[in-house]
Image (cartoon, helix red, strand yellow):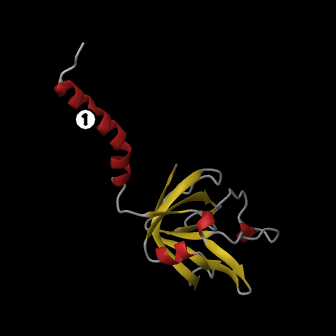
């Protein structure tokens, strides 16, 4: 049985819509951002220590999205937290036996949010800031930060 041209066109449109729907949903998340992974953070180790990767240098000052785990916060009412590659069950601030890993990113929230469990994967979106900086309120020194950020469980 031969199908009409109109029926074929309708199927093509439907198929095209179904295939393109995920792209529309991604585009609707707000401002565009580049994905950044923990493997992207550092390019090499030199005599001066860890050096930022070219990707990090290019994304400095730009919107990024990054997935990881929320380390237990320093205090419940803090408006920042540390994003880690692997879940951390204890707060390294609170234990002399634990040290922060090298590949952490400090996240400064654009508004207060309820903190999550340390084993829950989250996605953070905000502006990447690169370079050593000392938080005047806490004295916490960071090399990488995501500012004006928000996060959600994924």
Regarding residue 128, the answer to whether it shows in the image is: yes
Classify 50 as above or below 4.
Answer: below
Regarding residue 112, the answer to whether it shows in the image is: no
Nearer-the-camera pick, 113 or 151: 151
| Image quarter hosting the N terminus | top left
- Say which element carries label 1: helix
Along the horizontal axis of the image, is 105 left or right of 109? Answer: right
The local crowd at label 1, few if under 14, some if 14 to 19, many if 20 or more residues have their Cα within 10 Å, is few
Along the horizontal axis of the image, is 27 left or right of 145? Answer: left
At x 53%, y 72%, the residue is 55
Residue furthest bottom as drawn: 48
Quarter of the figure with residue 3:
top left
Residue furthest front as drawn: 2
Q: x and y percent of residue 101 in the render?
A: 71, 69
Q: x and y percent of residue 131 in the render?
A: 56, 83
At x 73%, y 68%, the residue is 92
Q: x and y percent of residue 50 in the render?
A: 68, 79
At x 18%, y 22%, the residue is 4
Nearer-the-camera pick, 77 or 25: 25
Q: Would you name the residue on which mark 1 appears? A: 13
Quarter of the figure with residue 137:
bottom right
Classify 71 as above or below 105.
Answer: above
At x 35%, y 62%, the residue is 31
Classify 66 as above or below 15.
Answer: below
Residue furthest top as drawn: 1
């Amino acid at each position: 049985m031969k199908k009409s041209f109109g029926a074929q066109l309708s199927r093509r449109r439907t198929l095209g819509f179904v295939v393109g729907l995920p792209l529309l949903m991604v585009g609707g998340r707000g401002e565009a951002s580049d994905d950044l992974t923990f493997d992207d953070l550092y390019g090499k180790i030199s005599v001066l220590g860890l050096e930022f990767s070219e990707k990090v240098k290019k994304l400095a000052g730009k919107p990024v999205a990054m997935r990881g785990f929320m380390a237990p916060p320093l205090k419940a009412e803090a408006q920042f937290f540390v994003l880690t590659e692997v879940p951390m069950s204890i707060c390294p601030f609170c234990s002399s036996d634990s040290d922060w890993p090298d590949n952490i990113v400090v996240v400064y929230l654009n508004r207060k949010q309820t903190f999550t469990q340390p084993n829950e994967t989250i996605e953070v979106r905000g502006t990447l800031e690169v370079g050593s900086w000392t938080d005047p309120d806490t004295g916490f020194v960071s090399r990488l930060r995501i500012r004006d950020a928000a996060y959600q469980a994924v």
